[in-house]
Amino acid sequence: MIDKFLLFPYYLSLKLRDSYYKRPGRKAAGAEVPTLCIGNVTVGGTGKTPHVEMVLRMLRESEEWGGRSIAVLSRGYKRDSTGFQQVIAAGSAEMFGDEPLQIKKKFPDVTVAVDEDRVEGCDLLVHPEKLSGRKYAKKCWNRDFPAAEYIVLDDAYQYRRFKATRNVVLVNWNRPVHKDMLLPLGRLRDLPERIYDADVVIVTKCPAEMDHMAKVKFVEEMGFTNFLPSACTATAPNGRQLLILFTTVRYGAIQGVYSTSEPRFSYAKKVALLSGIADDAPLRAYLSDTYKIVKRFAFPDHHRYTWKDINKLQELVDKNPTLAVATTEKDAQRLLDYSGMPESLRERLFYVPITTDFLSPEEQEIFKDFIVNM
């Protein structure tokens, strides 16, 4: 890889960091309950949040975990708050981060928390009584939640001080790690070979109709051998046997961001696309089947919308009175934080729901067994 030479100091730092955490005798902190980490080795674009939501649905539907206390822990990227905080549905993306807030709204009976320190966060989720102590009492606003019996960690694969019970790494079918480069030349934030240290590799955003040979080829290109499609297993170069699974994205009918959204605009023939995510190409392709996208407003991932952004959108709407505005679920959380949203935009702002599903029922059952029996 050319990035190993052009970015040698960065590459070397990653190699040294990896060697440090793999040195003999080193022990990482864990939790007293099962912990499942959903992560990747890239900066966004693999669909972590939809996969966390899929895991929660599967756990909630299982006999083993359906009626028990499940929690999600995230760092709450770009939030204004600090330390451990329990996310509440009535909160804001500014306070908790857009993804944790989205998860909480969809799963109100699941405890969702944010903490940069995953060791501390898991400990407090298992022992909420510690939040009454002097160290946390004044810092944590919402301390009332049941002790967690199962924790799903959203994006903690690079947090090497904590050792999850099991690790799931996501790889984007459209931008595979074996063809990517390290930041800033590419989107890799970690060594590509780190995928071999996981327990499961899920290839995400696959074509809905994907044949056997395409799967085999992709698995081999990632460096795995002995791929058994019936068991969904393969052998990594380091000798470990991993599960290799494939998922696809499914979009739903657009829904109003605000309660005052006018349903008639959902039938418009033209839309403006407003997004602040790592990759909006799949969403653009989906919308293009129904609408003509007259303008695309693309911002960096987790972008916080400003008056300037909203004003540009307003100017476009003034010129196109029948135009609808489409955005993502994640962006909807941040748009709701914008207090001065004009009514003419509120009535035409819609988000596109997103879910992720396995390509086959067999893969789903294998993964369900994997996350349930920990």
Image (cartoon, rainbow, N blue to C red):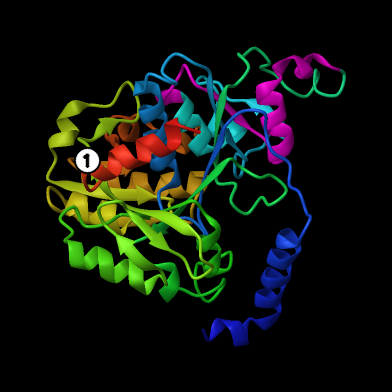
Q: Is residue 56 left or right of residue 133?
A: left
Q: Write the start and end of the magenta stretch as one range.
A: 105-133
Quickly name the residue at label 1.
361
Query: Residue 116, located in which quarter of the rendered image?
Result: top right
Q: Give how far across and how far down residue 306 sits, in percent.
A: 52, 45
Q: SS class of the residue under badge 1?
A: helix
Farthest residue, direction right: 134
Q: Give how far across and how far down residue 214 sits, in percent.
A: 22, 67
Q: Give how far across and how far down residue 355 sits, in percent.
A: 30, 39
Query: Residue 131, located in which quarter of the rendered image?
Result: top right
Q: Amino acid at mark 1?
A: Pro
Q: Give how far across and how far down residue 46 sits, in percent.
A: 41, 54
Residue at the image point whose x is 87% and y is 18% from the top: 134
Q: Is residue 278 left or right of residue 291?
A: right
Q: From what the image shows, is residue 59 above or below residue 202?
A: above
Q: Within the magenta stretch, is there residue 129? A: yes
Q: From what the image shows, is residue 285 above or below residue 217?
A: above
Whether residue 3 appears in this view of the structure is yes
Q: Is residue 71 left or right of residue 366?
A: right
Residue at the image point whose x is 55% and y is 73% from the top: 182
Looking at the rendered structure, the number of numbered marks drawn on it comes to 1
Q: From what the image shows, is residue 343 above or below residue 79?
A: above
> Is disc 1 surrounded by few (<14), some (14 to 19) or many (20+) residues within 10 Å?
few
Whether residue 42 appears in this view of the structure is no
Residue at the image point whose x is 49% and y is 34% from the top: 338
Q: Within the magenta stretch, is there residue 330? A: no
